[in-house]
Amino acid sequence: MLVLGIETSCDETSAALVRNGVEVLSNVVASQVEAHREYGGIVPEVAARAHVEAMVPVVGEALAPAGGRPDLVAVTLGPGLVGSLIVGLSAAKGLAWSWGVPLIGVNHLEAHAYSVVVEGMLPETPFLALVVSGGHTMLLEVRGPLDMEVVGETLDDAIGEAFDKVARLLGLGYPGGPVIDRISAGADARAVTFPRAMASSGDYNFSLSGLKTAVVRYMEKAAPRVGAPTVADVAASFQEAALEVIARKTVDCALELGASSVVLGGGVACNTRLRTMLEESSRENAIALVYPSGSLCTDNAAMVAALGYFQHELGGRMLQLDADVYPNLRPGTVVPGSRYQIDA
Ligand code: KG4
Ligand code: ZN
């Protein structure tokens, strides 16, 4: 079965063609990072308009290897920016209707959890997925394609958002995560002791807004003197505080759930220090750490097509022509049914 996936939840327009949920024939991603750089963050209206511009060429390129119409269209229904999601869903409805094929709606976070399936690395269930990006910091227990549950999440800022805000404060540009990652490598992560928020909260939730404020306060008070921490030392100290709690809770959560593997997803999963921390503690605890290659870690439609395929196989609910998007869609949620048959 050939599945066309469409993903527009944030600032990447992506379309992919995946056969039988595992074989990626195309995975086209148009990034908008340049359009948002001057604002130092994602501007929702700019994102939605950029999706409109990119949609037709991106889908056209993704469909090139198809040699006919796909058998199923899978699209991200949420969570994400409402305008961006609407562009993707509208395109998906038009294509599914004109081809007369079923349409399935996929949760973006659940798709991240399943991204490794197209690289043949899907672990035995139950496994734990850690999704860390500009918009999300979440732990998901994965029991199957239609059976996932949130077991931990941020109560305020997302981890990537914290990296981006701290980078802006330190004058390091946008997006900030990759720069902080790079300059932290040779820096002193113990130069400043920032708070480890919710480290002993007794659950698997996170809080990152206080850490960002702690960096603001530190920078306000820091007086230039010989031997003072450098910008790289401050960045590394922030990174250490932010990631230490995430890495520790992830492994503790996997142990409590009896999950023998942890799958990583989202842009922050590219972070070198996070990978090292997780590799060390998962090895000590006999947990397998699985991360997809770079282009499957960040937002992409191949993961949407893949999960859509497996959900369809299990009888997941198909969307109709009046289907809506869900900016706050939580993993594990079944969206309400609707009346207008796509293939009527
Ligand atoms: O998954 P993604 O491409 O887009 C969404 O947020 O949906 O993630 C982007 C985020 C940005 O906040 C960026 O600063 C962060 O991921 N990021 C990183 C690294 N690479 C990207 N954060 C820390 N270390 C990195 N190496
Ligand atoms: Zn994402």
Image (cartoon, helix red, strand yellow):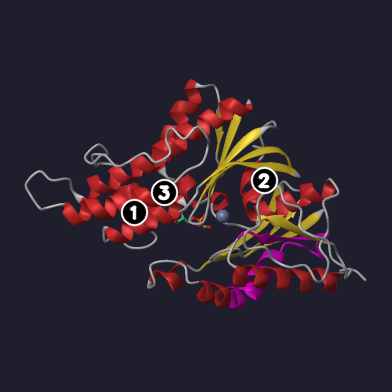
Q: Nearer the viewer, mark 3 or mark 1?
A: 3
In this view of the protein, which residue sits in the foreground, 100 or 134?
134
The residue wearing badge 1 is 179
The residue wearing badge 3 is 208
Most extreme residue toward the front, as rendered? 201
Q: Does residue 260 sit above or below 25 in this rendering?
A: above
Q: Residues within 10 Å of mark 1 (few under 14, many from 20)?
A: some
Which region shows up in magenta? 51-79
Label 3 and label 1: CA atoms lie apart by 19 Å
Q: Verify whether residue 28 appears in magenta.
A: no
Label 2 and label 3: CA atoms lie apart by 32 Å
Q: Could you say which disc has been placed on residue 118 in the image?
A: 2
- In this picture, residue 300 sits left or right of residue 227: right
- In this picture, residue 275 sits left or right of residue 115: left
Q: Is residue 182 visible?
A: yes
Q: Who comes first in sequence, dot 3 or dot 1?
A: 1
Q: Is residue 172 visible?
A: no
Residue 156 placement (x, y as % from top left): 47, 52
Q: Are marks 2 and 3 in contact (CB under 8 Å)?
A: no
The C terminus - image quarter: bottom right
Residue 313 placement (x, y as % from top left): 84, 47
